[in-house]
């Protein structure tokens, strides 16, 4: 039995071999929630947090990921060979193609095949007005931070909306987050980062990324994940570099805003989807993107931090927040304000306003891989490696 404690998530990585069985619990559990592996897998009553659970006995594997797949878990089958690992390239090296284990399901794998039992589906959100939904979202995020985040956690900070909301919630709760930001020396995000930190009254650990940093980070990530596209290599390398700097400073948890763009409509592509498919199509696209995060994006980010011995906490992807985000009407995510103007992440901006974030609530910012200048640097590097 592995337990958590209130006032910050507890990271656990534990494996026990008992007679003819093997139990593995790896994760970050929210607040006072813990997990009895056998009770959880048999009953389907799963704890809040980010985790993978695994039980091996009698030629069968029973395993599960958390509700949104924040922790990696992959499986592969070939003939009589069954392989399960949190590192996809381990399965690749066995000559088996890895497939992500579906989140929110308990899988049983044996010689007869694979069976899956869902344990969670998002519940409908109760109807209320715009202000009521903004208040519900703020309260859910506050509780998520309270449950997941340690007193002295690192916070991946870009000066944008998502990370600034998390930073303000941490500060309001009396936590002592270590804000960390990185980029190439000429990155365009530096000004936003410094202005947002000044508004919060916080200091930022600034990390200037070198070409050698990128080369080392990408090679390490591809050793675990296989060959990566430029975008994934860029994002993963930023997480890896920042996590290493936190680890050197004695910080063992990193907090990031992953999931906010998919839940609340942050990417530019959503403007095109709204134009072509309307709000109905936008809602479908947002939900699809949220439920696809487990395939590569979340494993990439989690493993990038794990390389440095740092646990990744994602407050936007605790199921209590994600469920609410999925239920908010798309009209409150991309808000038409007259003419052709559309405000992305409108409802999250309302939350930021209620937290007193002022100008930060309305800042428009490039995606991490672009604002840091890392995407261009990785593309140049891969071209030198003979990859397009």
Image (spheres, rainbow, N blue to C red):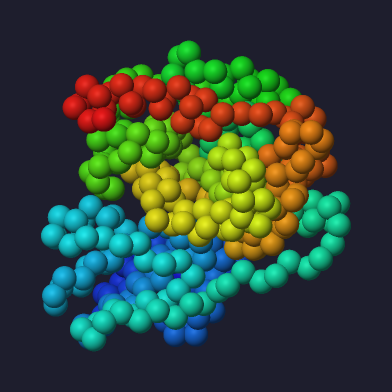
Please give the name of the residue rendered at 70% of the width and 44% of the height, measured from the top-left corner: 334
Please give the name of the residue rendered at 45% of the width and 22% of the height, measured from the top-left corner: 373
Q: Is residue 117 visible?
A: yes
The answer to which image quadrant residue 163 occupies is top right
Q: Position of residue 300 (x, y in %)?
A: 38, 47
Above/below status of 283 relative to 39: above
Please give the name of the residue rendered at 28% of the width and 48% of the height, measured from the top-left corner: 225
Q: Position of residue 25 (x, y in %)?
A: 39, 67
Above/below status of 176 relative to 114: above
The answer to which image quadrant residue 80 occupies is bottom left
Quadrant where the C terminus is found in the figure: top left
Q: Position of residue 346 (x, y in %)?
A: 74, 42
Return the residue nearer the eye: 103 or 53: 103
Extreme residue toward the front, this view: 276
Extreme residue toward the top, this view: 186
Q: Position of residue 234 (x, y in %)?
A: 39, 33
Quadrant where the N terminus is found in the figure: bottom left
Above/below status of 210 relative to 74: above
Above/below status of 80 relative to 69: below
Report the side of 245 relative to 82 (left or right): right
Please give the name of the residue rendered at 66% of the width and 25% of the height, measured from the top-left corner: 197
Q: Is residue 348 visible?
A: no
Report the side of 8 relative to 253 (left or right): right
């Amino acid at each position: 039995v592995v337990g958590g404690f209130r006032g910050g998530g507890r990271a656990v990585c534990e494996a026990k071999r008992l007679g003819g069985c093997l139990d593995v619990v790896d994760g970050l559990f929210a607040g006072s929630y813990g997990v009895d592996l056998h009770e959880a897998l048999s009953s389907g009553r799963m704890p809040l947090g980010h985790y993978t659970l695994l039980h091996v006995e009698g030629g069968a594997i029973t395993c599960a990921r958390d509700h949104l797949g924040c922790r990696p878990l992959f499986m592969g089958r070939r003939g009589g060979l069954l392989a399960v690992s949190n590192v996809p390239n381990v399965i690749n090296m066995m000559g088996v193609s890895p497939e992500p284990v579906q989140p929110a399901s308990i899988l049983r794998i044996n010689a007869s095949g694979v069976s899956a039992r869902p344990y969670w589906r998002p519940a409908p959100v109760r109807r209320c007005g715009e202000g009521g939904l903004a208040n519900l979202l703020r309260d859910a995020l506050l509780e998520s931070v309270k449950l997941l985040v340690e007193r002295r956690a690192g916070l991946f900070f870009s000066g944008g909306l998502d990370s600034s909301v998390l930073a303000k919630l941490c500060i309001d709760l009396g936590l002592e987050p270590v804000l960390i930001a990185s980029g190439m020396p000429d990155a365009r995000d530096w000004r936003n980062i410094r202005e947002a930190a000044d508004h919060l009254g916080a200091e930022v650990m600034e990390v200037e990324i070198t070409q050698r940093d990128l080369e080392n980070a990408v090679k390490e990530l591809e050793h675990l994940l296989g060959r990566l596209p430029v975008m994934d290599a860029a994002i993963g390398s930023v997480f890896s570099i920042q996590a290493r700097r936190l680890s050197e400073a004695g910080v063992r948890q990193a907090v990031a805003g992953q999931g906010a763009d998919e839940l609340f409509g942050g990417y530019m592509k959503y403007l095109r989807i709204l134009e072509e498919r309307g709000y109905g199509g936008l809602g479908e696209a947002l939900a699809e993107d949220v439920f696809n995060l487990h395939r590569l994006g979340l494993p990439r980010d989690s493993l990038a931090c794990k390389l440095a011995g740092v646990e990744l906490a994602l407050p936007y992807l605790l199921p209590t927040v994600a469920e609410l985000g999925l239920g908010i009407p798309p009209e409150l995510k991309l808000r038409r304000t007259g003419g052709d103007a559309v405000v992305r992440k409108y409802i999250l901006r309302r939350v930021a306003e209620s937290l007193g974030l002022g100008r930060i609530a309305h800042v428009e910012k490039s995606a991490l891989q672009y604002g840091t200048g890392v995407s261009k640097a990785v593309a140049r590097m891969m071209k030198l490696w003979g990859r397009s």
